[in-house]
Amino acid sequence: MKRNFQSQARKFSWLVVSGAFFVSMQVSAQSVSVDPSIEYQTIRGFGGMNGAGWINDLTTAQVNTAFGTGEGAIGLSVMRMRIDPDSSNWSVQVPTAARAAALGVTLFATPWSPPAYMKSNNSLINGGKLLTKYYDAYTTHLLNFASYMSKNGATLYAISLQNEPDWSPDYESCNWTGSDFAAFLTQEGSKFGTLKVIAGESVGFTHSMTDPILNSSTASPQVDIIGGHLYGAVPTDYPLARTKGKDVWMTEHLTDTNSANDWTYALPVATELHKSMVANFNEYTWWYVRRSYGLLLEDGTISKRGYVMSQYARFIRPGNVRIGATVAPYSDVAVTAYKNSSGQIVIVAVNSGASQRSLSVTLKSGSAVSFTKYSTSETLSVGYGGKTTVSNGTATLWVAPKSVTTFVSAVGS
């Protein structure tokens, strides 16, 4: 009996010590300073590619789920579409584009190839180059698409000159160099009027593809958006584009083709979104809205990847500005912050580690009175996590392991 008592006493003593250690670990928080006076890029939105013509079009319900902004929707605000080289096929793009436009979505379009007769290989596939004698005809082709979409209730915000000009696959494609883009824009750029022009869209966001445009006194004024993809690349700041006053858009990527509901592969999408924001990208577009690896699954339900995107897209709306924030309070936690014109602050934290993390957030007094928490993890899907009051300009925010969490402020008076 005595031995049992001593054993119980030792056990109780261990629990007290270990409990104190646990509490100590939990209350220890790393500081995150949020400064709304420090402004970076203006966010144009988060989007997806609609594959109409190559895969089945989105249904009305799927458009609402992808591009709606309320609970149960992803909140995408940008949609990309393809410009078919054959104008008789353009009607296939109209239904979803018109529905998205009615929801206030920003539309942009990309050609994979000019019509075959305009190219050096007289083919839609395997690269080839746009012949200079057809520069004017190609401009007309692009503008005709924009006009057609506008007449059908789907006005474009921007139009690209070419998808992946540094790639020659056995599907629709066309090769351009940076010098080709500069020459085309110098000759044709003014014809696009108020329609914003996207140039680049290289496979790996290769700056050498767009530097010649930006460094040209005649071509640079004719381009509005520098676009690029992230295949084999990581998000990287583009100071030259920023100093020239150009938006930088990530117009296509998918991190892998594994199941979109496999959390092991879904969480890295949050990391890439974070890195894209820190790289001063104004926009991010995922490849294919609906696919087994997409934001929607084939049955139209939101995938885990879709919920990850929603943590950004639903709460960081077009016109929001990224603001100063401690980017890496822990080695496994990545943070960005944003504000809108009303002063509302949104903080997104990606915790790729296995431990719960505590963030001691400090911000200018009066800029927020409380934060509402939403999280996506293996078990949560933009799940409501309660409210935290801001006291004397400080709030303690908790981030679960292997999750992406968005904190949305209530603005102080």
Image (spheres, rainbow, N blue to C red):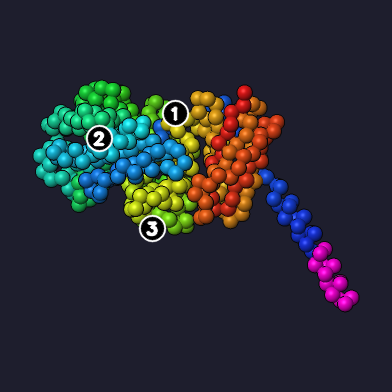
Q: Which mark is residue 258?
A: 3
Badge 1: few (under 14), some or many (20 or more) residues near its Cα, within 10 Å?
some
Disc 2 versus disc 1: distance between alpha carbons?
Answer: 25 Å
Q: Secondary structure at mark 2?
A: loop
Q: Residue at x 55, y 44 (%)?
A: 384
Disc 2 versus disc 3: distance between alpha carbons?
Answer: 31 Å
Q: Is residue 110 visible?
A: no
Tag 3: amino acid: Asn
Q: Which residues are magenta?
A: 1-13
In the displayed structure, does residue 41 sit left or right of residue 249?
right
Q: Quadrant of residue 100?
A: top left
Q: Residue at x 54, y 53 (%)?
A: 402
Tag 1: amino acid: Gly
**Residue with the mark numbered 1:** 319
Whether residue 7 is in magenta: the answer is yes
Dot 2 and dot 1 residues touching (CB under 8 Å): no
**Residue with the mark numbered 2:** 161
Q: Position of residue 249 (x, y in %)?
A: 37, 36
